[in-house]
Amino acid sequence: MLSTADIFRLLKPFIETVVTDDMDGVQGKVAFTKYMNVDTMDDAYVDDTEIAGTRLLAEKSEGAEMQLDHVKMGNLKRYTARTYALKVVLTKEAQEDNKYMEAIPVARMLKKSAWVTADVFSALILARATNTSYLGGDSQPLASASHTMPHGGTFSNTMATPMSPSVAALMQVRSALSQMPGVNGIISPVMAEKVVFPIVQQSIWDILLGSEKSPEAGNFTAINVAYQMGLEKVPVHHWTNTTTEWGVVTDQDDGLKFKWRKKPEGSTWMDNDNTTIKFGIRARWDGGWTNARGYYHVAA
Amino acid sequence: MANNVGVYGIRPATGKYASSKNPLTKIVATAYQANPGSAGNVDLNIFDPVIRVSDGSVAIATATGATFGVIVGVKQVYNSGIGAISPSNKVPGGTAWTTIDRQTQVLVLPVYGQYFEIDADAATATTLAGWQAFIGENCNLSYTVNTTEAKAYPRLATASHNTTNTLPWNIVDVSPTMLNQDYSGLYVKLIVQANVIDDVPVSAGSTGV
């Protein structure tokens, strides 16, 4: 409950500046919209599944019957909308006596909280990439060397010997992605599009991806392969469990997903018994990944 | 391992049976100095737990004893420097008053029928499942007194988790807050209810599960 005690310095008009969180343009400042595939869901839950298509042709002898193949259904990934909400209770006295109402824009604060919560939720998907308590449709964590395929076999979306950010590391990522098996198990090259990383690595990636020529000692006139890859940099502010891990978002559909069931919706109501004003905000969403080929993780 | 953001005190979460109850106005004795566990002098801050005192006032609860309520606001504090009642978000230790109109008054939310959120004082568990295993058990509080800030920093002493009925706080759930980001870090937030209650009727505590 926000009472006059909580804002006691704002009860008289002699404050020069009230410092609070920046609430302008909150939707544009979140990171998750840049690395998650954001869309909406129309039901309480939605299911994604995968279908492995036909594989390679077999030579057929004249007059002989052609070989049979089949299409196989794979894993199921269910997205179940969960509700997130928060409220602030403001006493009428605090509203009446506050000389700096613009310093406590409760509705805007709650809106920021909602968008930042979604941002944190998405960052936790990356932070828990190797955590076996958080599994996808194939019962593997996001980053695994044992993702399953419907026709059988496994594929990896994680660097076997993790490397710190470097040109060589990106070369290895590109090499691994170029040999990624598709859903049907046949190599179906994947392209890296974005590099995602804890924001503490920002400067490293600025150098790596911003230099036309090699940024590393040895031959500064050499071509910088990392620059030529044309990767978009996406620093993730709330990826805080590590300073060394990083990842690459690829061009594969249905990789990392964030699904709004209900975008943040604020409400205000009075409690006349207690003479308080209540501000609330509520949103519904779920997130995760359907196709692990949409993300490649480096647990450096 | 990354520590979760620490949040001060025992925060009202939701009402147990319906919406959160109304806070009561309670007095703090003149010149009262909070010193939880004799660890150092602190102010009374919002979200500190309190017990009833025989003179009708409230005082900071002990780490292992009963709780009456949690401070959720400060109604008035006498400021001797200016000779007037001042609004405040805390009660400075040793605040003296002599007349009724200068009484130190705080708003206290009784613990009966209320769930609270509190930070664990240690990484006693390291996974969500590990923390969930404590649900139903009882714990003591702990105070990490900071005399520079004059704050008591009450937290849940999760290492004390047990079914013993005399432990004053019962773990109801792991808080669903997004502030719980690393279950192996410090300051995991838990939802608790008071188990040993200083109120009418007194609750001597239930055995945990």
Image (tube, grey):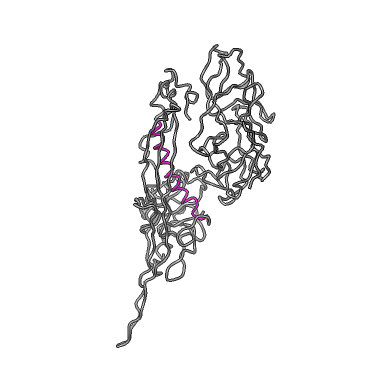
State the residue at coordinates (57%, 49%).
B132
In this rendered view, identify the residue nearer to me: B199 or B1: B199
> Residue placed farthest to the front in the image?
B201
Secondary structure character of the magenta stretch overall: helix
* Side of A142 relative to B145 (left or right): left
Q: Is residue A198 visible?
A: yes
Residue B134 is a magenta residue: no
State the residue at coordinates (54%, 42%).
B4
In this rendered view, identify the residue nearer to me: B36 or B181: B36
Residue A208 image point, x, y percent? 42, 50
Relative to A10, does residue A193 appear above or below in the rendering? below
Labels in figure, total: 0
Residue A21 image point, x, y percent? 43, 33
Quadrant housing residue A269: top left
Residue B202 image point, x, y percent? 64, 33
* Side of B12 relative to A219 (left or right): right
**Magenta segment boundaries in residue numbering:** A106-131
Relative to A21, does residue B83 appear above or below in the rendering? above
Residue A116 is a magenta residue: yes
